[in-house]
Amino acid sequence: MDKLIISVAVNGGQLQRTDTPHVPITPPEIADSIIASAQAGAAIAHFHIRGDDGAPSADPERYREVRDLVRLESDVALNFSTDLRLGGGRDCLRLGPEIASLPAGSVNLGDGVIAAPRPLLFEVANEMARAGVRGELEIFHEGMLGTARRLAESGLIHEPVFCQFCLGFDGGAPADAAMLLRLIAGIPAAWKWSLAVEGDGGLPLLALATGLGGHVRVGIEDTIMFSAGQLAVSNAQFVERSVRLATELGRPVATAAQARAILALPTAHQHACLPQ
């Protein structure tokens, strides 16, 4: 069993200060949250960029600012959001992130939709491959498994394939053990998988994923509540709990360097950015 890779999803693209005062919005806030989470034990940090008004943004200069601030203090692997709902969402790929998220199909999320027809997915996956970026395949429901397999078979997603099961998201598959087991059964044994759960009741499923040999994603993007009636005050708080849980279950936690080895990622200092 691999060491546990803890990913932290620090902000998402939709949460506002009115939802929680603790969501990081500006590039310095995002970087500070990533650094603190890495110090707590996160090996990968996933983040979305916002504009000055807090609205979702695809501005590559803001991605660059976060990246450069983080690299002053941490070698945590950075996972950029290529939000397909935003025009220019793929522009961040030219900055050469180690990982970038890619939904393996279309899904309704709340009142919005991620429209990801197969030709678009192959186009983005090709851009990732050319940039040397590892695609993290986001699986929101079982219907995405077939497309995920086709992407993997195309060779555009480098081995070992890394997928993120996203359960409990409004419009996606339910967050329960039966669904998690169905998804695990639906992918090749050689794939690496991680679990993200939206909402307040995800801890038992995250514990199950840890025990089954998967990896976990935690953070304010997925839930603003740390426990019943208790608002999370930081992303590091979630990471610390995941470390404690892994320790109780007897599973070592991966460092950023170990996560890179498990997923065959380039190192933070060797990964070259594309010409600007």
Image (spheres, rainbow, N blue to C red):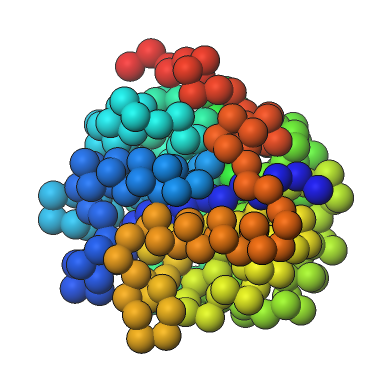
Q: Where is residue 50? Give x, y as percent.
A: 24, 50
Residue closer to the observer: 35 or 96:
35
Indicate the quadrant containing the C terminus: top left, top right, bottom left or bottom right: top left
**Identity of the residue drawn at 45% across and 25% down:** 96
- Residue at image location 13% in from the left, 49% down from the top: 52
Side (left or right) of 228 relative to 16: right
Q: Please determine whether, in this image, residue 75 is positioned above or below residue 212.
A: above
Q: Is residue 107 above or below residue 57?
A: below
- Residue at horizontal 40%, vertical 31%? 74
Residue farthest along the left direction in this orientation: 53
Counting the numbered discs, the total is 0
Image quadrant where residue 32 sits: top left
Residue 58 position, x and y percent, is 31, 43
Where in the figure is residue 152, as x and y percent of width and height?
75, 41
For residue 153, side relative to residue 70 (left or right): right
Along the viewing direction, whichever of 170 and 86 lies nearer the viewer? 170
The answer to whether residue 180 is visible is yes
Percent x, y of residue 127: 54, 30
**Picture residue at 23% right of the left edge, 53% below the top:** 25
